[in-house]
Amino acid sequence: MIPIRDTIPSRNYPVVNNTLIGINVVVYVLQLAQGGRMSEFVYTYGLVPAKFTVPHIAAHFSTGQLLFSLLSFMFLHGGFLHILGNMWSLYIFGDNVEDRLGSVYYLFFFLLSGFFSGLCHFFLNIHSTAPVIGASGAIAGVMGAYFILYPTSRILTLIPVLIFPLFVEIPAFFFLGLWFLLQLLNAAASGGAMSGIAWWAHIGGFLFGIAALKTLGVMPETRFGDTLRRAVMQKKKSPRFQVIQPRGGTGSREENNLYDTIRITPYEAAAGAKKRINIPRGLTNRFFNVLIPPGTRDGSILRLKGLGRKGPDGEQGDLYLTVRIHQPW
């Protein structure tokens, strides 16, 4: 299952979340620039339990390097797909959690989630000489917080079925619950990190995210965080990709037309927008572009000719989309 987006728009521009994504990308480029010294770079700034527990290994590192690695490991990645998957998950789940926690608390929450996930791996692999790197544990904490804050949200998910991409909306509590179950099963099967993936770091981060939200609740924004929130640009656009589940009309049995809604922001209503909709039909998916003209009003109806049902006489109905203007902040 590959998450595409969630269905809850964030009210504010996720300045900290996007900054974290940017820092990870910059550090990854810096990591690639090491060339032949990359292994040394990763060993120095990655989390290696043996650096703390094996004296002859610890002797090669300063106290500052040892302490800094407890933070720096979560900004290193093992390859392009590794960082792509992590940053995509952070992009999907992080903006909403930042919305609820506030920018300042969200930053501390992210770093503490990563730190705690590292500790989980450390104590279960106390003499390991393999470096653990990646933001997965911190992002798992964000996912745990999302699990508590938005259990009824829906995650648009890509499920490959043979050669056909199937897009479905899955409740967040089910998607994240299944993800956590898979981490547990992999950890039990592989003994933690023996497969090259720190499963217990994922588990620890996720549980920390849940515990932190349950224990501390949603904390009030600080004065600095409130100033920061007002200073950044608020979101102006709704997701470009939307899933449509059209319904038949209430008229006669011969009714071939289909009906649904499409959501846009006030900015898009005034300036116009282009959306791409997905209409699931069994195991197949049909994609269409929809043009929202400038000056569209709430309740306006867009007619997509020929996208309805085919009647007994072979005549093709139309798809009518009612425009709903949604203020995301």
Image (tube, rainbow, N blue to C red):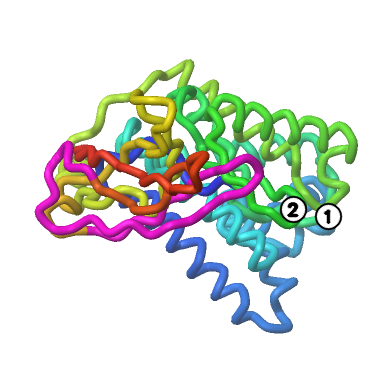
- Badge 2, how many Cα within 10 Å: few under 14, some, many 20+? many
Q: Is residue 20 above or below residue 174?
A: below
Q: Please, what is the dominant secondary structure of the magenta stretch?
A: strand
Q: Which residue is label 1 attached to?
A: 129
Q: Are marks 2 and 1 in contact (CB under 8 Å)?
A: yes
Residue found 45% across the figure and 40% down from its top? 6
Residue 262: x and y, percent? 31, 42
Residue kind at label 1, given as amino acid type: Thr
Q: Which residues are magenta?
A: 273-301
Residue found 48% across the figure and 49% down from its top? 278
Residue furthest to the top in view is 215
Q: Which mark is residue 1?
A: none
Of callouts 2 and 1, the N-terminal one: 2
Residue 42: x and y, percent? 69, 66
Residue 35 in which image quadrant: bottom right
Residue found 82% across the figure and 32% down from its top? 185
- Badge 1, how many Cα within 10 Å: few under 14, some, many 20+? some
Instruction: Decide whether residue 246 is among the magenta residues.
Output: no
Between 125 and 313, which is closer to the camera in this rendering?
Answer: 313
Between 192 and 92, which is closer to the camera in this rendering?
Answer: 92
Q: How many marks?
A: 2
Q: Which residue is label 2 attached to?
A: 48
Between 289 and 325, which is closer to the camera in this rendering?
Answer: 289
Instruction: Decide whether residue 290 is among the magenta residues.
Output: yes
Residue 203: x and y, percent? 68, 33
Residue 328: x and y, percent? 24, 39
Q: Quick check: 202 left or right of 74?
A: right
Between 249 and 316, which is closer to the camera in this rendering?
Answer: 316
Residue kind at label 2, given as amino acid type: Val
